Image (cartoon, rainbow, N blue to C red):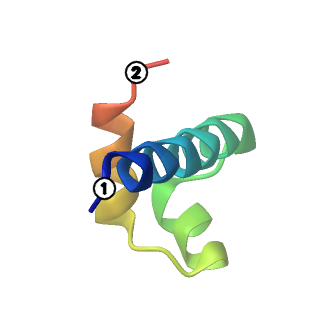
Amino acid sequence: MTEQGRQQLRQLWAQRVEAFLDSGMSQRAWCEQRGLRPNQLGYWLRKIRF
């Protein structure tokens, strides 16, 4: 993956993490609604610190 691709992925997940935190939902419920895996969200929650 190129540096630009990594930056885009990080930006995408930063937006997702912010949306999750604003939702007040559980990780599992939020991910199910969006077709994502909870372990992916957990990874990015640890990686991106707001």
- Name the quadrant of the N terminus: bottom left
Inter-mark Cα distance, 2 to 1: 23 Å
What residue sits 63% from the left and 74% below the top? Answer: 34
The kind of residue tagged 1 is Thr
Observer-nearest of 5 and 19: 5
Residue designated by label 2: 49
How far across and down, in percent of the image, does residue 48 sit? 39, 30
Amino acid type, callout 2: Arg
Q: Classify 33 as above or below 23.
A: below
Q: Mark 1 points at which residue?
A: 2
The percent position of residue 30, horizontal first and vertical second, equals 60, 62
Position of residue 22 in the picture relative to residue 4 (left or right):
right
Q: Residues within 10 Å of mark 2 (few under 14, many from 20)?
A: few
As displayed, is residue 13 above or below residue 39? above
Q: In which quarter of the image is residue 7?
A: top left
- Determine the residue positioned at 54% across, 39% down: 14
Q: Measuring 36% from the left and 49% from the top, which residue is drawn there? A: 6
Vertical placement of residue 47 versus 17, above or below = above
Which label lies toward us, 2 or 1?
Answer: 1
SS type, badge 1: loop
For marks 2 and 1 on the same chain, the one whose residue lies earlier in the sequence: 1
Disc 2 on helix, strand or loop?
loop
Q: Where is residue 3 in the image (x, y as percent from the top left)?
A: 33, 46
Above-or-below relation of 16 to 30: above
